[in-house]
Image (cartoon, grey):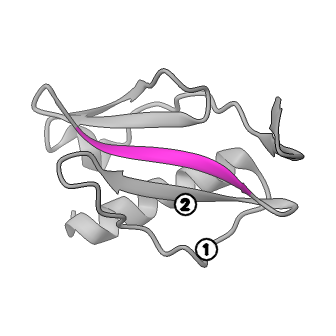
């Protein structure tokens, strides 16, 4: 785990692509940073899920890669980095209405 300014930056493994995303021609891919997973749809990177430290817990920022807007609820925190990534995926699904 990388430490920046005293905070542990998590390394996340890219989980299998959820069925709801596959139905829309999407897939999850690793990004250049160890704490970021990209969501590709129809061969284009559309969303970025960034797992971030939140004091002694984790959060997941969901960024629209087209316009840079955040789609997540910044108050959502999770006990582990994996839970934060799964929570971010669920927030993305709800935001897209899928």
Say whether disc 2 or disc 1 marks the residue closer to the N-terminus: 1
Q: Position of residue 26 (x, y in %)?
A: 22, 36
Q: Residue furthest left?
A: 42
Vertically, is 2 above or below 60? above
Q: Position of residue 16 (x, y in %)?
A: 46, 30
Vertically, is 69 above or below 53? below
Number of the front mark, 2 or 1: 1
Bin the neighbour count of mark 1 within 10 Å (Cα to Cα): few under 14, some 14-19, many 20 and up: some
Main secondary structure of the magenta stretch = strand
Q: Quadrant of the C terminus?
A: bottom left
Direction from residue 93 to residue 30 in the image, left or right? right
Local SS, label 2: helix
The magenta span reads 46-53
Q: Which residue is mark 2?
A: 87
- Decide: marks 2, 1 in contact (CB < 8 A)? yes
The dot on residue 39 is none
Q: Quadrant of residue 24?
A: top left
Q: Quadrant of the N terminus?
A: top right
Residue at horizontal 63 percent and vertical 55 percent from the top: 84
Let me know if residue 49 is in the magenta part.
Answer: yes
Q: Quadrant of residue 2?
A: top right
Query: Mark 2 and mark 1: span between their CA atoms?
Result: 8 Å
Direction from residue 30 to residue 98 in the image, left or right? left
Let me know if residue 26 is in the magenta part.
Answer: no
Residue at horizontal 54 percent and vertical 73 percent from the top: 74
Local SS, label 1: loop
Q: Nearer the viewer, residue 98 or 7?
A: 7
Q: Which residue is mark 1?
A: 76
């Amino acid at each position: 785990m990388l430490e920046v300014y005293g905070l542990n930056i998590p390394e996340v493994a890219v989980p299998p692509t959820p069925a709801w995303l596959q139905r829309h021609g999407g897939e999850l891919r690793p990004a250049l940073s160890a704490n970021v997973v990209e969501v590709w749809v129809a061969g284009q990177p559309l969303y970025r899920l960034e797992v971030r430290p939140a004091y002694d817990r984790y959060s997941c920022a969901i960024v629209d890669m087209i316009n840079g807007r955040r789609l997540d609820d910044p108050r959502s925190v999770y006990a582990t980095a994996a839970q934060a990534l799964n929570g971010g995926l669920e927030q993305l699904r709800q935001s897209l209405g899928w």
